Amino acid sequence: MLHTFVVYVENKPGVLSRVVSLFRRRAFNIDSLTVGRTEKPDVSRMTIVTDADEDQARRIETRSQILELATVFRAKVLDIAAESIIVELTGGEEKVDRLLELLSPFGLLEVVRTGIVAMRRGVSKSPAVASKSAGPVIVDDDTVSYSV
């Protein structure tokens, strides 16, 4: 039976290959594939038609929904395996909580969170000080990225 999937993905090099690999690893034949930009320049719409039974189609639909959520939250998909997907998300506590809430119906196997992290963006103005310092370097300018 033919099934049609519509997936919104980041408009970046390599995304099409990753999505097609998802089908290839499951040994699904793609009968039709169309990709085009949406009204948002950084998002593309993929329409994929494949021949699959109901159980196979349900698994593909679940994965595509998780991949869509990862795209919306600008999360990185680090790994896709037979029974799991590893997603990395950087952002504020509310953003992380919202994604976890939306992913919970799919079944969360494991969640790992870190505390607040601050890292200097770009090249340090004084690398010698940072490399010799045994303690934390305190920076009070706009070159620091904060994450919860």
Image (cartoon, rainbow, N blue to C red):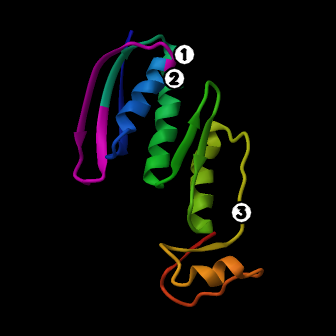
Q: Secondary structure at mark 3?
A: loop
Residue in front for this viewpoint, 54 or 114: 114
Seen in the picture, residue 6 relative to 103 is either above or below; the reply is: above
**Label 1 vs label 2: CA separation?**
5 Å
Part of the protein shown in magenta: 25-46
**Image quadrant where one finds the C terminus:** bottom right
Q: Secondary structure at mark 1?
A: helix
Q: Which mark is residue 114?
A: 3
Q: Which mark is residue 55?
A: 1
Question: Residue at left 57%, top 90%?
Answer: 140
Give amino acid for label 3: Thr
Residue placed under numbered mark 2 in the picture: 58
Residue 93 inside the magenta-drawn segment: no
**Label 1 vs label 3: CA separation?**
36 Å
First in sequence: mark 1 vs mark 3: 1
Question: Residue at left 31%, top 46%?
Answer: 11
Residue in front for this viewpoint, 40 or 102: 40
**Label 2 vs label 3: CA separation?**
33 Å
Give amino acid for label 2: Arg
**Image quadrant where one finds the N terminus:** top left
Residue in front for this viewpoint, 85 or 47: 85
Question: Residue at left 37%, top 16%?
Answer: 50
Q: Are marks 1 and 2 in contact (CB under 8 Å)?
A: yes
Give amino acid for label 1: Asp
Question: Residue at left 72%, top 49%?
Answer: 111
Residue 24 percent coordinates (x, y): 45, 18
Q: Is residue 133 left or right of residue 23?
A: right
Q: Which mark is residue 41?
A: none
Q: Quick one: which residue is furthest to the bottom in this view?
A: 140
First in sequence: mark 2 vs mark 3: 2
Q: Secondary structure at mark 2?
A: helix
